[in-house]
Amino acid sequence: MSTAILELREYRPTESTDTHDFHQVVIGLSGRMSMSLDGDATRYGRVASRNGVVIPAGVRHDYRGDGPNRQVVLDVPSRLAATTGSQRAFAHEAFFALDASLLALARRVSARSDGARPLSADDPVVREWLGALTARLAPARPAQRTVRLDLARIDARLRTALATPPDTATLAREAGMSVRHFHDAFVAIAGETPHRHLMRLRLAYADRLLSTSDATLADIALEVGFNDQSALTHAFRQHYGQTPAAWRRECHARPTSG
């Protein structure tokens, strides 16, 4: 590979593994994908519309798309990283939150009518991306190397207490971080805020209860952490596009296999 390639990609919902001899950056535009780095379960995260992941050359990464997704992917040969002074941005693998500059660049790529056309190293947009990535990633490296969040552990912690979950201050204290640092680190690795993440876990559990149990909507609302049935209905409709009652009727109307 002799040139940088910047293009839009969609990752399939199947487990895949890759290692390559060039650096790579993946930034979310829509949907979500999951990834673990270097075979380390504690380096597991998700790429969504508020974050990205940098994968230095030679680092193994296991990944899959979590449903429909669109990602900006930049493949950077080591020689180009050296000649542009951006090699320090690829010194370590890490998830990172997008700053205003990278958000604006992602939106520009998304808005391009020919966005599917790969861009080479000669394109000014590629050089602009490398500059923005270096400005965002290089200063954050020391904190990212010394403090890690175990997203899988946090997920398990929240799932066991959806009705009365630990607050952000408690999770931050357990991670040995300030609340602000924890919030920023969480967005970097999960692609969403702790509050939005908790809401998504609650709705996913409500979805499962609606399809597998005969519990009333009021009881389900309380079990997954909503104050009442009305709050569950409002959040569920926003997320799934229909009410819990309609969702349950649809689930029960589906033919069962076997």
Image (tube, rainbow, N blue to C red):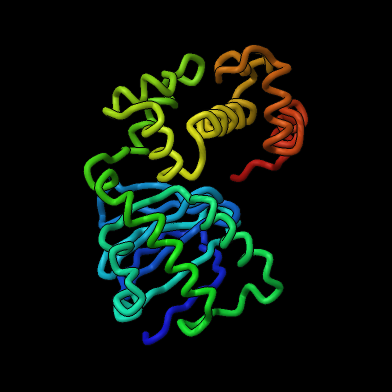
When the figure is inspected, residue 34 is found, relative to residue 187, above or below; the finding is: below
Horizontal arrangement in the rendering, residue 169 relative to residue 239 (left or right): left
Percent coordinates x, y for residue 60 in the rendering: 28, 63
Horizontal arrangement in the rendering, residue 146 relative to residue 181 (left or right): left
Rendered-image quadrant of the C terminus:
top right
Percent coordinates x, y for residue 72 in the rendering: 53, 65
Residue in the picture at 45% in, 18% down? 165
When the figure is inspected, residue 14 is found, relative to residue 208, above or below; the finding is: below
Residue 151 visible at all: yes
When the figure is inspected, residue 183 is found, relative to residue 79, above or below; the finding is: above
Rendered-image quadrant of the N terminus:
bottom left
Question: To which quarter of the image does residue 92 belong?
Answer: bottom left
Q: Nearer the viewer, residue 7 or 20?
A: 7
Residue 155 visible at all: no
State how many labels appear. 0
Percent coordinates x, y for residue 237 in the rendering: 73, 32
Residue in the picture at 53% in, 78% down? 124
Residue in the picture at 45% in, 54% down? 52
Question: To which quarter of the image does residue 241 belong?
Answer: top right
Q: Nearer the viewer, residue 130 or 191?
A: 130
Percent coordinates x, y for residue 101 in the rendering: 53, 56
Q: Nearer the viewer, residue 211 or 132?
A: 132
Residue in the picture at 25% in, 48% down? 142
Question: To which quarter of the image does residue 242 belong?
Answer: top right
Report the residue that reaches farthest toward the left.
Answer: 146
Report the residue that reaches farthest toward the bottom.
Answer: 2
